[in-house]
Amino acid sequence: MEQLTWVADQLVMSSGWELIALVLALAYLMLAAHQRQWCWLAAAVSCTIYALIFWQAKLYMESLLQVIYIALAGYGWWQWQHKDDAAQSTGFKFSWRWHLRQWLWLTPLAIAIALALQQFTDADAVWLDTFTTCFSLLATWLIAQKAFETWWYWLIIDTAYVYLYWSKGFVATALLFVLYVVLVIYAMYRWRRDQHTELVTES
């Protein structure tokens, strides 16, 4: 009971801007699960708010990630609107070899960035912050392609974010990512069901 009371107190203490960003981030994932193009607008506004919040918390890579997310939201909007052929496919698009190639260059890049941040800045939680940032960009690009494997990335990344945000005192956002993990599983179900419906319709 005391733990629940503490969580409730932390939610009340959360800034209004963090709560707005939380609601919009939640809307983004729900809309994405249902393949609605408006998910990208919700994402762009939410990321703008989070970029400012994370910069103040000295999570510089997370702040930079939000800025890149804004650009990717514009790309995702365009991709879903104009790439009708891609928009209809929700299956696996890339082989395990393709993913392995991405890991082979993303991992050393994340290590180099983390070492630089550790050496030259006062950034906090540099390793987890950097690795989640680098692989979140890959996962976001994959969702813009409507590649089903994006959800496997998000399942791992969002779980890591729960710990990161909770440890930094962003209780509302940490709880959001707990819900994200559940919604990622729901999105996997929805995309699979939509793919099955498309196959039945085509046959």
Image (tube, helix red, strand yellow):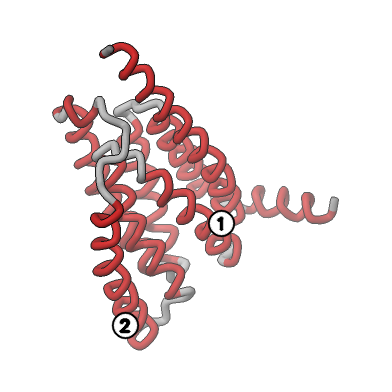
Along the viewing direction, whichever of 164 and 189 lies nearer the viewer:
189
Locate residue 46: give its quadrant.
Answer: top left
**Mark 2 to mark 1: distance in Å?**
25 Å
Residue in view at x 31 percent, y 76 percent: 113
Q: Is residue 165 above or below residue 185?
A: below
Q: Is residue 159 left or right of residue 108?
A: right
Q: Which is more N-terminal, label 1 or label 2? A: 2
Q: Element under label 2? A: helix
At a point 72% along the width and 48% down the height, the residue shown is 8
Please tell me which residue is depicted at 29% across the width and 75% down the height of the picture.
108
10 Å crowding of disc 2: few (<14), some (14-19), many (20+): few
Task: Identify the residue under disc 2.
Answer: 116
Percent across and percent down for residue 29 are 43, 37
Work out whether 67 lies above or below 40.
below
How many numbered discs? 2
* Residue most extreme to the bottom: 119
Q: Nearer the viewer, residue 104 or 165?
A: 104
Q: Position of residue 156 (x, y in %)?
A: 48, 55
* SS at badge 1: helix
Residue at point 47% right, 67% down? Answer: 57
Residue 178, percent across and down? 58, 48
Mark 1 neighbour class, 10 Å CA radius: few under 14, some 14 to 19, many 20 or more: many
| Residue 162, label in figure | 1
Q: Is residue 121 above or below residue 104?
A: below
Amino acid identity at mark 1: Val
* 25 lies left or right of 91: right
